[in-house]
Image (cartoon, rainbow, N blue to C red):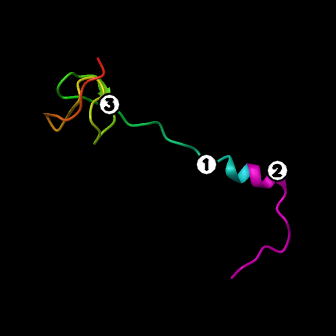
C-alpha cells in the first residue's frame, strides 16, 4: 500500500478539498397540491405519496 513520503501542507490539503462541493437538493412539484417536495418522499403540505394519503398534513 502506498504511503505518503512527506506530510501534506495545510494549503495543499485545503486547495484539494476546495473541490468538494455539495449539490442543491432536487425538488419536484407534488402532483396533488403542486407544492415543491423532494422526490420519493411524502409531501409535507398535503401528506400524499404516490397519490395516496400516507401522513397527516402539517396544515
The quarter of the image holding the N terminus is bottom right
Q: Residue at x 85, y 65 (%)?
A: 7
Task: Tell which tag, 1 or 3, sits nearer the viewer.
Answer: 3
Q: SS at mark 3?
A: strand
The numbered disc on residue 11 is 2
Q: Residue at x 38, y 37 (%)?
A: 26
Task: Estimate the x, y position of residue 21 in percent, counting from the top left.
Answer: 58, 44
Q: Residue at x 74, y 49 (%)?
A: 15
State the residue lying farthest toward the front. 56
Give above or below for 30 relative to 21. above
Quadrant in the picture for residue 50: top left
For the residue pair 2 and 36, the one nearer the viewer reads as: 36
Give above or below for 37 relative to 10. above
Give above or below for 6 relative to 48. below
Q: Which residue is mark 3?
A: 37
For the residue pair 49 and 11, the one nearer the viewer reads as: 49
Whole-angstrom CA distance, mark 1 to mark 2, is 15 Å
Instruction: Read off the magenta span.
Output: 1-14
Specify which label sits upstream in the sequence, 1 or 3. 1
Whole-angstrom CA distance, mark 1 to mark 3, is 26 Å
The numbered disc on residue 50 is none
The quarter of the image holding the C terminus is top left
Task: Estimate the x, y position of residue 4 in percent, counting from the top left.
Answer: 78, 73
Specify which label sits upstream in the sequence, 2 or 3. 2
Inspect the magenta stretch and tell me whether residue 11 lies in it: yes
Q: Which residue is mark 1?
A: 20
Task: Estimate the x, y position of residue 13 in percent, counting from the top left.
Answer: 76, 55
Q: SS at mark 1?
A: loop
Amino acid at each position: 500500500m502506498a504511503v505518503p513520503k512527506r506530510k501534506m501542507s495545510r494549503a495543499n490539503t485545503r486547495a484539494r478539498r476546495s473541490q468538494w462541493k455539495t449539490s442543491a437538493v432536487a425538488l419536484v412539484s407534488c402532483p396533488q397540491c403542486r407544492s415543491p417536495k423532494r422526490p420519493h418522499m411524502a409531501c409535507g403540505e398535503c401528506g400524499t405519496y404516490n397519490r395516496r394519503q400516507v401522513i397527516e398534513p402539517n396544515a
